[in-house]
Amino acid sequence: MPVNLKAIEERITELVSEAQELQHFIEEHTVELFGSEGAIAHRNPVFYELKKRYQRWYGVCFQLLQNNMGFRLKEFENIYEKPQGGMWGGLCIKDLLTGEHTTILHAQMLQMGIQNQCAILESMPEVIRARTLQIDVLATAQLLDDELLQATYLLKRGFIRAAGAIGGVVLERHLKSLCRVADPPISIPSKKTTISDLNDQLRAHQVLSDADWRRVQWMADVRNLCDHERDQEPGKEVVLEFIQSLAKFIKTTLQ
């Protein structure tokens, strides 16, 4: 099922806002929550409100992470229930919500824990974008492989120009794909952008080496020979070398 990234971003914004309100609640009621040594937590309505708010927030965040970023779920969960070292003194958020630890330092620990959980939550949109982009790249690579098989088939049947033309389409699509996955992505200026334009942009952004740039220039020349040049027939061996070189170029630049 496709991920609705916009809806997830909006939900995360709401959850982060709720976490900020929760932290403000802790600050506003610090004395009632963490300044009464020996107070009975379950009889303290303010403490009960804190636990209720946090548990609701935690449950929604947990489900969102489980559905969309499962590899960070355990880290998020550990902040809640696994004893933390350092200034935490072997405590976790679950311990701090028992009402047995009643100092200002414990209030600060709780706020820090919520802040750390928010940081994990806020990383989700970029992770989803990266995963979606990776899926798109893999799907594009499969499509290009299929088209190269078509080009090879046509070449074997003697349709040399048609094979070279398909190779040119594959090359242009792959260069555009490299622009999309570059970090940061490389802007493609217009619909009339040529293979040479894409090649220059990728070299300028250090996505392609000088050797790769020269290889693409040569492939572009073969493609132009198949597409446009009518005074000279492209040789079968040259087009075969073009298709084989293109297949190798795609595999090495997608790694």
Image: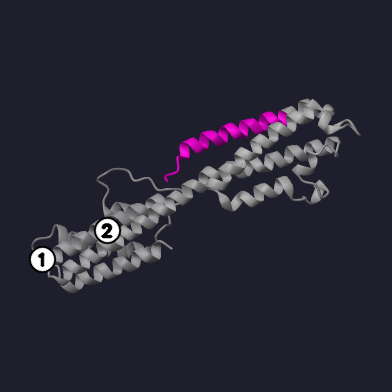
- Please determine whether, in this image, residue 195 is positioned above or below residue 34: below
Task: Answer whether residue 16 is magenta in the image.
Answer: yes
Residue projecting furthest to the left: 231
Q: Is residue 30 left or right of residue 75?
A: right
Q: Mark 1 sits on what residue?
A: 232
Write down the region rendered in magenta: 1-24
Residue projecting furthest to the right: 38
Look at the numbered disc 2 and give the secondary structure of its residue.
helix
Where residue 111 sits: x, y (%)? 74, 37
Residue 123 visible, this angle? no
Residue 24 visible, this angle? yes
Q: Which residue sits at x=68%, y=37%?
A: 55
Q: Which residue sits at x=39%, y=50%?
A: 180
Q: Which residue sits at x=83%, y=36%?
A: 99
Where residue 35 sits: x, y (%)? 87, 31
Where residue 31 sits: x, y (%)? 84, 28
Q: Which residue sits at x=57%, y=45%?
A: 65
Please name the amino acid that badge 2 sits on. Val
Please name the amino acid that badge 1 sits on. Gln
Toward the viewer: 10 or 175?
10
Q: Which mark is residue 170?
A: 2
